[in-house]
Image (tube, helix red, strand yellow):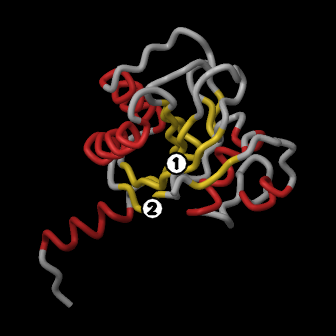
Amino acid sequence: MFFPRNLVCYLYDAMNLNQVFLHTGTNLGNRQANLRLANEWIEKEIGPIVQASEVYRTKAWGITDQPDFLNQALLARTRLSPFELLEKIQAIERRMGRVREVKWGERIIDIDILFYNDAIIETETLTIPHPYLHYRNFVLLPLMDIAPGLVHPGFGKTITELYANSEDTLLVEVVK
């Protein structure tokens, strides 16, 4: 059987894309617009967004005396390595005006890598899966929208199981 060269190249490329789950959050400015702009930049700089969760609102976690956050989980495909992905994410955050002054402080945008394929990476600059995701319902609930059966490679539990065992009591609600 004969396949046109461009179709063969497309199929080859599609098979070599990495699956990444990202989490976006914002609590400054026009939060809905911030999430939309982050998604646009992710599609331009990282790769196509295959699935996106509902947008959720929650109180701040960590430092609680700040505006509520809007959060969303994304499934994207990319050719980037985990470290290239981190560089692109940080560049998008800077481009959107993110300034890192206080850990868990207010921010115009935050983009976290939750999972990269089923990789487990622990370095000084990058930890995948995200080390706090199983403690945070504002991460787990959006992730359950798009990947309830995804198995955490370190814990061997699904996102649904992690949520069922979560001790987080912060209210997380869908934005209407």
Q: Residue furthest front?
A: 176
Residue 78 screen position, x and y as percent: 37, 49
Residue located at (87% from left, 43% from top) = 167
Residue 16 screen position, x and y as percent: 38, 58
Whether 142 is drawn above or below 31: the answer is below
Residue located at (16% from left, 86% from top) = 2
Q: CA distance from mark 1 to mark 2?
A: 11 Å
Tell me the crowding category of disc 2: few under 14, some 14 to 19, or many 20 or more residues within 10 angstroms, Cα based.
Answer: some
Res 171 quadrant in image: top right
Residue type at tag 2: Gln
Residue type at tag 1: Gln
> Which mark, by number, is residue 51?
2
Q: Answer with left or right where residue 45 lies relative to residue 149.
A: left
Residue 17 screen position, x and y as percent: 39, 56
Instruction: Say how many tags the image has.
Output: 2
Residue located at (13% from left, 71% from top) = 5
Q: Which residue carries the number 1 mark?
A: 72
Identify the element where label 1 is drawn.
Answer: strand
**Looking at the image, is mark 1 or mark 2 earlier in the sequence?**
2
Residue 46 seen in the current view: no
Nearest the viewer among 129 and 109 is 109
